[in-house]
Image: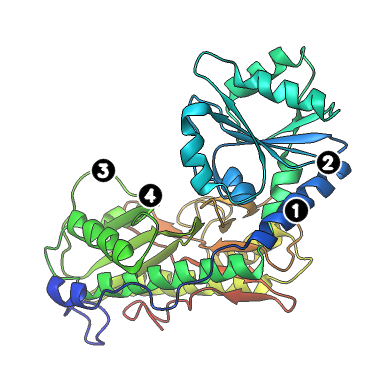
Amino acid sequence: MSLNGQIGGLDLAQARASLAPWSTPARPIGAGEYQQRLERARSLLRNLGADAVLITAGTSLRYFSGVPWGASERLVALLITQRGAPIVICPAFEAGSLERVLLVPADVRLWEEHEDPQQLVADALRERGAGNLALDPAAPFVVAERLRAVLGGKPLMDASAIVDGCRICKSPAELALMKQATAMTLQVHRLAAGLMREGISRSELVRFIDEAHRTMGADNGSTFCIVQFGQVTAYPHGVPGEQYLAQDELVLIDTGCTVQGYHSDITRTYIYGNPTAEQARIWELEQAAQQAAFDAVRPGVTCESVDSAARAVVEKAGLGPDYRLPGIPHRTGHGCGMSIHETPYLVRGDQTALAPGMCASNEPMIVVPDRFGVRLEDHFYVTEEGAAWFTPPSPAIDRPFA
């Protein structure tokens, strides 16, 4: 067990006693920012040559309207046209619930269970004199097909440029929500590390991590939680079944939560006991690769060049190349915000130029097949000068927290 006070030495009662609701919650997104999002969408509509965009239930619906509903077989959508208030298409029996979550002024059009909601979209387009319709890239295939039917087979445009163009760069208010979410998850990681003891089970840690996120004020506890010990750390997302921690094993925990819809996603890998020379070497190489990716970030640099910077460190040490193992089996990182994985991606082929406000994970995991893996994951946001961490990275294999 570590003697530095970070790994082990804490019992469940002590960990629970240190939990409390977050003392400095970030402010919700304000009405003015929602209006700015709608105006930005209209500007991008014009650039695309479209007359309207239909946003279906999911994260983008919440982004533009505040409605936090997920997709189901019933169409709930927001139609944004060049002129006029946005139009919400909603099942009639959900009208009362909609009224309590809709955060933008809108023309609400309700449909009964036997009616075709896609026809309401077609009618609204005709009323607004809108011809070309761009469709949310996350819309179900069946919605696209039913829209084509009521629009007389007219082709639908891909609204990715509108959705990504609005969501890719975070505002100060969005960054504040993400800073709260990441700070909460880092504190959960600290407490989980303190709970380490020989024989502790994966499931006990997963339950505590969810409880801790809930107590601190996350929207719905943990959004996900991966706990791995020893040889299982060689599988980036783990394997099924219970696990129990043994002395001198690596621990990998990857978890996150949401605060008002904005995600955290942090991974820590550390040793319970004493590392082997090989484990220590790979951990330090992972740390160097993560730092190289961070140092490569600045406005105008492409996403793929950040991925290349991390890989260069690992390949120089004789691992890889590319996705070969031992080495880095996956991309260096992914965008994050209202979706845990979203544009942009730090991967070869993504030539998106980084810009202030963009956010991404930095996690160039190194895997030694059938033996162990090391993933250090923190997120950064792009500034005018380069990158800024949401959470401070791990300093050492036996000291996971700065």
For label 4, the residue is: 237
Give the distance between the C-alpha atoms of the residues marked 3 and 1, in whole angstroms.
Answer: 36 Å
Please give the name of the residue rendered at 42% of the width and 77% of the height, measured from the top-left corner.
Answer: 394
| Crowd tier of the residue under label 2, counting other residues whose Cα lies within 10 Å: few below 14, some 14–19, many 20 or above | few
In the picture as drawn, the residue positioned furthest to the bottom comes out as 4
**Mark linked to residue 322:** none
Nearer-the-camera pick, 346 or 317: 346
Tag 1: residue type?
Answer: Gln
Relative vertical location of residue 145 with respect to residue 347 in this rendering, above or below: above
**Mark linked to residue 83:** 2
For label 3, the residue is: 240
Tag 4: residue type?
Answer: His
Q: Provide the secondary structure element on which disc 3 rests.
A: loop
**Residue 3 picture quarter:** bottom left
Disc 3, disc 2: CB below 8 Å? no
**Mark linked to residue 351:** 1
